[in-house]
Image: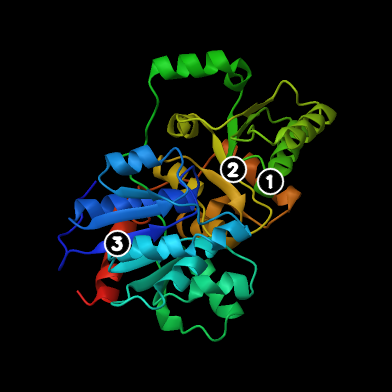
Amino acid sequence: MSSISAPAKLLTVVQLIPALHSGGAERSALEIARALVQAGHRSVVISAGGRLVEQLQAEGSEHVTLDLGRKSLLTLMRLGTLRRVLRELKPDIVHARSRLPAWLGWWALKGMRPQPHFVTTVHGLNSPGRYSAILLRGERVVAVSQTLRDYVLSHYRWLEPARVRVIPRGIDPEAFPYGHRPDDAWQKAFFAEFPVLAEAPLLTLPGRGTRLKGHHDAIELLADLKRRGIEARLLLLGVIEPGREAYVAELRELIHLRGLASQVVLAPPRHDIRDIYAVSALVLQLSNKPESFGRTVIEALSLCRPVLGYAHGGVGELLAELYPAGRVPPGDRERLVERAAELLRVAPSISPLQSYRLTDMQQATLALYDEVSGS
């Protein structure tokens, strides 16, 4: 991975986020924190904490534990604490990545002299309204895709287009190397754990246990392929999570009704997702609502694995640019099974990614910080 260029001047940047457990916004916060440290800046994250704090601190950033994301009147009582912390830190830039922390950050900055610059990132297609509008009050507003930029500009006519910058999320090509194949020991262990997955081409749908991710559509796709005489297996990776038991039971019932009990595996999140992608014949992205971005799309394509997904939101945007053969109209079961059959038979070649790299995202964000701070 290429190094981050030297800064014009050293900055103190504070990122505000609800917690550091998992998720796209959380991962982006860590990636920018790492880039700040590598460039010699001071990086601080304020959050309620979580399993990623250890990594954040190991990579040279500071963490202040303060719960700014809980939707409760008690959270408003933390405004004074946040203002005191910011006065002690004396940041050049405060970067908010979520709505409630952004509101608290906005109020905390009022009256501070000198006043830090306020930057925001819109990570999702939030419901338009006054509550969501705080993420558009930054001196610069980062949108993680062109789809998201178009969305906010269409719903907030007062928003100056020049303030909204598209900085797509990126991946490290070294973490998802082109043409990667897992070693024999990993494959032996994986297929010993899930022997049914070794019996036919593997379809993998990565995504947490929520209806929005399209698990029902993936199960119906497998059933449709079976009716056409095409053998395949399906891995719903990440669907098993605490608190999702009722949803998982619903999926298992559908799997039973379609006669697919011996062809589908439901699994919790795993750390070896790169290897799982690499042994998959197809990676699915079937979210039934548009998403702001589609990180799984670029992860799989970076590994040279075909992706089949619905052509809407950020996923459709990425597929249109990088892998048009994998696009199908949202919810169109007939086109979905036809395209799946085609890709399982002969998938178009995939070139190494020349965009959506982690360093591209990091350098663009640091350049934006330099811009707003007058460096």
Q: Is residue 127 above or below residue 347?
A: below
Residue plotted at (60% across, 15% down)? 195
Please provide percent x and percent y for residue 215.
69, 41
Choose mark 1 or mark 2, whichever is in front: 1
Image spot of residue 247 (x, y percent): 75, 37
On screen, 132 above or below 23? Answer: below
Outermost residue on the right side: it is 257
Cα–Cα span, label 3 and label 2: 47 Å
Q: In which quarter of the image is residue 85?
A: bottom left
Residue 284's mark? 2
* 52 vs 200: above or below: below
Determine crowd level at label 1: few under 14, some 14-19, many 20+ residues with C-alpha closer than 10 A: many
Mark 1 lies on residue: 214
Q: Which of marks 1 and 3 is in front?
A: 3
Residue 79 position in % (x across, y down): 48, 64
* Residue type of the residue flagged with mark 1: Gly
Name the foreground residue: 118 vs 247: 118
Q: Which of 345 and 203 is in front in this view?
A: 203
Splitting the image into 4 quarters, where does residue 282 fall? top right
Image coordinates of residue 153 in percent, x first then y, are 54, 78
At 53% from the left and 67% from the top, the residue drawn is 148
For the image, the number of numbered tags is 3
Q: Is residue 32 visible?
A: no
Q: Is residue 263 left or right of residue 101?
A: right
Res 96 → quadrant: bottom left
- Distance between mark 1 and mark 3 Cα atoms: 46 Å
- What residue is rendered at 27% in x and 69% in y? 92
The CA span between labels 1 and 2 is 9 Å
Within 10 angstroms of label 2, few (less than 14), some, or many (20 or more) residues?
A: many
Mark 1 / mark 2, whichever is N-terminal:
1
Where is mark 3, residue-wise? 88
Answer whether labels 1 and 2 touch (C-beta < 8 Å). Answer: yes
